[in-house]
Image (cartoon, rainbow, N blue to C red):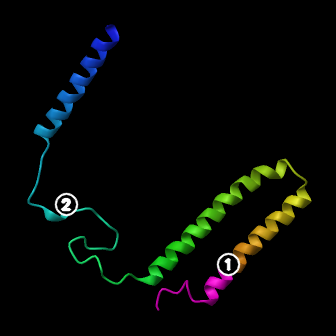
């Protein structure tokens, strides 16, 4: 019985607070830009079928790939204490070599040049 009465009081207080928030909040229906969702680089009031820059997409994918690979390097530092140092150096060298080969390929394909 006590639990039920406490639950009712909590629900009542939360409903009163939500009602007061709705009543007291400042609403501006006049400002169209502030009420629209923000999307980086896009005008939300224009057509959704505008051409998208493929170069912007490639830079985003490159960033995500390198971000994930950097997140994989951090546990490698911890594992230096757990395994043989020579084995860990070989694994680290191979991993960093793959990163450098990927970076060289992106540079060779002019994916890092913004002026295309």
Whether the magenta-drawn stretch holds residue 107 is answered as yes
Q: Secondary structure at mark 2?
A: helix
From this viewpoint, which residue is outermost toward the top?
Answer: 1
Above-or-below relation of 6 to 16: above
Closest to the observer: 103 or 48? 48
**Residue 24 percent location from the top left of the image:** 12, 38
Q: On the image, numbered disc 1 is attached to which residue?
A: 102
Question: Quadrant of the rendered structure where residue 46 is?
Answer: bottom left
Q: Is the residue under label 1 in contact with that under label 2 (CB below 8 Å)?
A: no
Tell whether 79 sits left or right of 29. Answer: right
Upstream in sequence: badge 2 or badge 1? 2
Tell whether 51 sits left or right of 16. Answer: right
Give the residue drawn at x 50%, y 73%: 60
User: Distance of mark 2 from mark 1, alpha carbons?
Assistant: 42 Å
In the rendering, which numbered label is found on residue 34? 2
Q: How many marks?
A: 2
Magenta-drawn segment: 102-116
Q: Secondary structure at mark 1?
A: helix
Whether the magenta-drawn stretch holds residue 56 is answered as no
Question: Quadrant of the rendered structure where residue 45 is?
Answer: bottom left
Above-or-below relation of 75 to 116: above
Above-or-below relation of 64 to 72: below
**Residue 71 percent location from the top left of the image:** 64, 58
Q: Residues within 10 Å of mark 1 (few under 14, many from 20)?
A: some
Image quadrant in which the N terminus is located: top left
């Amino acid at each position: 019985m006590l639990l039920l009465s406490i639950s009712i009081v909590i629900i009542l207080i939360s409903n009163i607070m939500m009602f007061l928030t709705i009543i007291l909040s400042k609403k501006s229906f006049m400002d169209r830009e502030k009420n629209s969702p923000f999307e980086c680089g896009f005008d939300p009031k224009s057509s959704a079928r505008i051409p998208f820059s493929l170069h912007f997409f490639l830079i985003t994918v490159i960033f995500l790939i390198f971000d994930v690979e950097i997140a994989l390097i951090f546990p490698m530092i911890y594992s230096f204490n757990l395994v043989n140092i020579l084995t860990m150096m070989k694994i680290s060298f191979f991993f960093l070599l793959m990163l450098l080969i990927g970076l060289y390929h992106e540079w060779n394909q002019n994916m890092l040049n913004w002026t295309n």
